[in-house]
Amino acid sequence: MNAPHSSSPLAAVQMAPKDPILGVTETFNADKNPNKVNLGVGVYYDDNGKVPLLECVRRAETRLAEKPAPRGYLPIDGLPDYDRAVQALVFGTDSAAARENRVVTVQALGGTGGLKIGADFLRRIAPDSQVWISEPSWENHRALFESAGFTVNTYPYYDPSSSGVDFAGMIGTLRALPPASIVVLHACCHNPTGVDLAAEQWTTVIETVVSRGLIPFVDIAYQGFGEGIDADGEVVRRFAQAGGPVFVSNSFSKSFSLYGERVGALSVVAGSGEEAARVLSQLKRTVRTNYSNPPTHGSQIVAAVLTTPELRAFWERELGQMRERIRDLRRQLVEKLRARAPRADFGFVMRQRGMFSYSGLSKSQVGRLREEFSVYAIDSGRICVAALNSRNVDYVADAIARVIG
């Protein structure tokens, strides 16, 4: 007689909770209301409610198609032209750290991939460190570093009473952290609040990070959506000039509208060229054990655009148009809410930058928006301003005015 089979190890697997952002889209997709609006997902849409195909991308793809080539494996650290173009964009063409070969860059699977590579690498070289993220922060920041084995804490950031930054709380916490603490910082267009630090506040943060011997991990997923390409990258460049190690994750999902290509990078600023070479060797080891090497197509597009003057000009113009359109949508939303709910002050939305806004809506109000109007947002009240358009902004303003009474 055969012995009874033991129960499958899969039998005890529990259903995971829905992702707080992607789960909203799943519910939105099942909604039958023709007026439904999804303000939850972090995607830039044009006025037709579509993800745009940028002209610079279309032209780059045409050029690549005219010269077809075999698709062999890329190097572990990615397409060399792409890595160099990333360094020039993020750190500036006159970067002393890049000239001195103190910056190393590896192509990653989006900005998330850059964070993942950095988290895994840091876990090996600084296993006793803890990670500090802003309160609030992008939900995946906590998950990525916890999955790498870190304890993740928060530093104060958003102040609901002023709809601004609790800078005293933030800097007070950073000044009390032990050396080698890893501090995750948003370079611009803070996700989820849209509230950024002022230049003089960044000066204090950088001085504190350097003097305390902290490890800054700068996430710059929205370069060009705040004030402009160079202005938004200024924080990274200041960190690179200040001395000490700097980790930088960047993404082209939003700025190139290449969401599905997963094009990003991790860059690390080291103390010397020799140190940088050792760091790169270990980053490549980390990549090798994660996904071996990155895909080709998206990095070729970005590299072509960033290094071809004609295509670069197209991109900068299109990115500027996206940036200005978001600002105009903020203005429209504020003005329409002022007309519909004059006792409510949404002026703070105009002071925020980038794709997202901490709207000030409560969880119950977000629930009413969803249940009564099929307007979807994150429970925290975060909305994606870039999901508004000329056909839905009045409907959204009407819905918000109704739920805030």
Image (spheres, grey):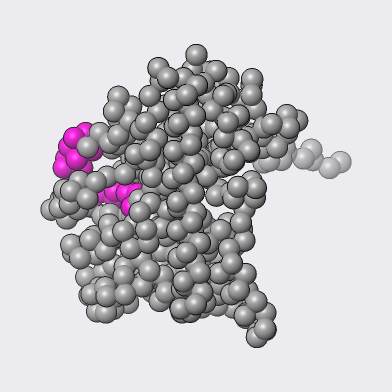
Residue 217 against residue 293 in the figure, above or below: above
Residue drawn at x 18%, y 48% as measured from the top left: 200
Say which of 75 and 378 sits in front.
Answer: 378
Say which of 36 and 4 sits in front.
Answer: 36
Work out which residue is located at the far front of the displayed protein and give it. 339
Residue drawn at x 61%, y 35% as measured from the top left: 392
Residue 361 against residue 64 in the figure, above or below: above
Q: Is residue 1 visible?
A: yes
Work out which residue is located at the far left of the displayed protein and give it. 211
From the top left corner, tell me how far across and down residue 30 is, in percent.
73, 33
Say which of 99 and 113 sits in front.
Answer: 99
| Residue 225 left/right relative to 378 | left
Residue drawn at x 51%, y 74% as measured from the top left: 311
| Residue 112 left/right relative to 11 | left
| Residue 375 left/right relative to 196 | right
From the top left corner, tell me how far across and down residue 14 is, in percent.
63, 34
| Residue 263 left/right relative to 222 | right
Q: Quadrant of the N terminus?
A: top right
Q: Is residue 23 visible?
A: no
Asked if residue 321 is among those painted magenta in the image, a careful observer would answer no
Say which of 72 and 285 sits in front.
Answer: 72
Work out which residue is located at the far right of the displayed protein and give it. 1
From the top left corner, tell me how far across and down residue 364 is, in percent.
52, 18
Work out which residue is located at the far top of the displayed protein and give it. 405
From the top left corner, tell me how far across and down residue 380 is, in percent.
46, 29
Name the quadrant containing residue 68. Answer: bottom right
Name the quadrant containing residue 231. Answer: bottom left
Residue drawn at x 67%, y 41% as measured from the top left: 9
Which residues lie in the magenta part?
168-187
